[in-house]
Amino acid sequence: MNSTPLVGSPFTPAQEAVLKKWTTFYPHKEMGLVEALRSVQEWDRHIRPEAAAYVAELFDLPFNRVWGVATFFPSFTTKPTGKHRIGLCHGLSCWLAGSPLMAKRLQETLGVAEREVTKDGRFSWEEMECLGACEQGPALLVNDRLQGAATPEKIAKLKDLE
Amino acid sequence: MTKVLTRHFDEPKLHELETYRRLGGYKGLEKALSMPRKDVIEEVKKSNLRGLGGAGFPTGGKWETVPPEEKSPGPRYVVVNCDESEPGCFKDRVLVTRAPHQVIEGALIVAHAIDAHDAFIFVRGEYQDQHDIFAKAIAEAEAAGFLKHCSMKLMRGAGAYISGLDTALLETMEGKKAWPRQPPPFPTVFGLMGRPTVVNNVETVSMLPHIMVNGGEWFAKLGVPKSGGTVVFSISGHIEKPGVYEFPMGVKLREVLAAAGGIKGGKKLKCVIPGGTSMPPLLEKDLDIAMDFDSVRAAGTFLGAGGMIVLDETVDAVEVAHNIERFLTHESCGQCTPCREGSAWTERILERVLEGKGTAEDLPNLTRVGENITGKVICALGETVGVVTRAYMTKFPEDFKKRVPNNG
């Protein structure tokens, strides 16, 4: 199959190289799809239809298959997130530990509602399902890295992130 | 107290190959490689090791169903499930952070047992730190020559709880929506890309090096007749010292709670969720039950993945049921109509009850919706949607009735 997509590329050559790497990293091409879409989400902070179309061609998959995956998984969004995507766990243990209060604190500190992006594009926050850190609730996640329990101090410090 | 997986957790550099080997690491793999595959499987069967990701299926018995090479020529795969996402469960995260080589060694033992040459570790996307720990450990293992017979690659998930279910995990790995498959065929026959695949949990594979070194009989004796060895509990909620605790299978629930310092602030216990929020809760009167797969099942709930959440007397069962059903509604994959619709209905009814707008029909409706899901869906998530609220309604009827004044 051809390896140069027919649709115009929405990516830089370096990004294209990363996506191409995912087509050969696993024993079967399509096994690299979720990782490739993770890369797209990281670069663009969301997945646009034209990006999905490019990925579909690269992986020899129908657009619908790729768009289906892109809209199924919670880590992928069709609307941009902030540069720093902040998650607050509201699973049962984190809720017992006071996640609703910390959600309020995030909204006040960052000045935006859940899933909205700050004007400078640096932050968005959202409540997330169990993050696997129930003993440190309410668990705080910044760009897929756990930060221990959310506290007013920790939330205030988020603004220091570049 | 007998500890298997967490025995050396006081060693600060246990995550590094040098320390792991100094403490006997990779001796289990060495032993396994010196044995015929059949004997490795026999040893694991003798150990009574059961899957610690939640299902409790006998591990050796699972491997045995992988068809022999002549019946199914071509590759076979090993997948380590590190997609722990059930509220209350965090032991995989701790096991990987402290002892990644224990997981890698275990996965290589599985590979030898089923004659696989490609292994994958599927790590949930939110465990980026653990993904990086694995990447470093795999590189160390490769440099030390442990990956000569079997490659090992990492793959990250993308935030879906359902990906943690074996068949949905395989779909995710194949670049598809994480829709569970309807077995049979089971993954050991038709797994990743249609090839025989063993999917084992992080904790399960971590046990294998120890079984190889000390023997299946030794492991079996640590536990109870049908559940061998130990189990690592994650404990959170209203408890003094939340964290990870390893006990022999069959330990009394009371003993586990005492080890974790007891109920926070000396309050009274309302209930304990034994295995993660999908499991019906246990009450004060159940504190002397033995924590192993079959005893917990006999008490009407499940050991699951050992994710215990302790709830004190101040908690309202309606709020708990609502929190859990909201999670399940969000995580329902949408494939089976009874689960997709029923989870959302259940959540909405509970929300209305919480807001004080409950009507006389709401409680019977919650029961009816639950009953109409159970047995009509492909996977355990759907089954749970139907079971959880009914369990809280049965055990704490007063909490529900007081919120619905004219409940009939």
Image (cartoon, grey):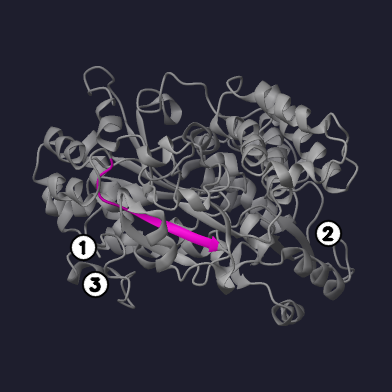
Amino acid type at circle 3 is Glu
**Residue B241 visible in the picture:** yes
Which residue does the image show at 24% across and 72% down from the upper left? B18
- Residue B25, numbered circle: 1
Which residue does the image show at 38% across and 50% down from the upper left? B202
From this view, report whether residue B328 is shown above or below residue A150.
above
Between B100 and B324, the one lying in front of the other is: B324
Which residue does the image show at 28% across and 42% down from the upper left? B227
Decide: few, some or many residues near mark 3? Use Cα within 10 Å; few <14, some 14-19, many ≥20.
Answer: few
Which residue does the image show at 57% across and 69% down from the upper left? A136
Under circle 3, the secondary element is helix
Under circle 2, the secondary element is loop
Amino acid type at circle 2 is Glu
- Residue A114, numbered circle: 2
Q: Cα distance, mark 3 to mark 1?
A: 9 Å
B260 is within the stretch colored magenta: no
Question: Where residue B318 sits in the image (x, y, percent)?
Answer: 73, 47
- Residue B18, numbered circle: 3
Question: Where residue A56 sits in the image (x, y, percent)?
Answer: 66, 35
Q: Earlier in the sequence, mark 3 or mark 1?
A: 3
Q: Cα distance, mark 2 to mark 3?
A: 45 Å
Between B121 and B288, the one lying in front of the other is: B288
From this view, report whether residue A24 is shown above or below residue B252.
above
**Image: magenta residue range:** B227-236
> From the image, which quarter does the N terminus of chain B lie in?
bottom left
Total marks placed? 3
Parent chain of label 1 = B
Residue B337 appears left or right of B215: right
Parent chain of label 3 = B
Amino acid type at circle 1 is Gly
Parent chain of label 2 = A
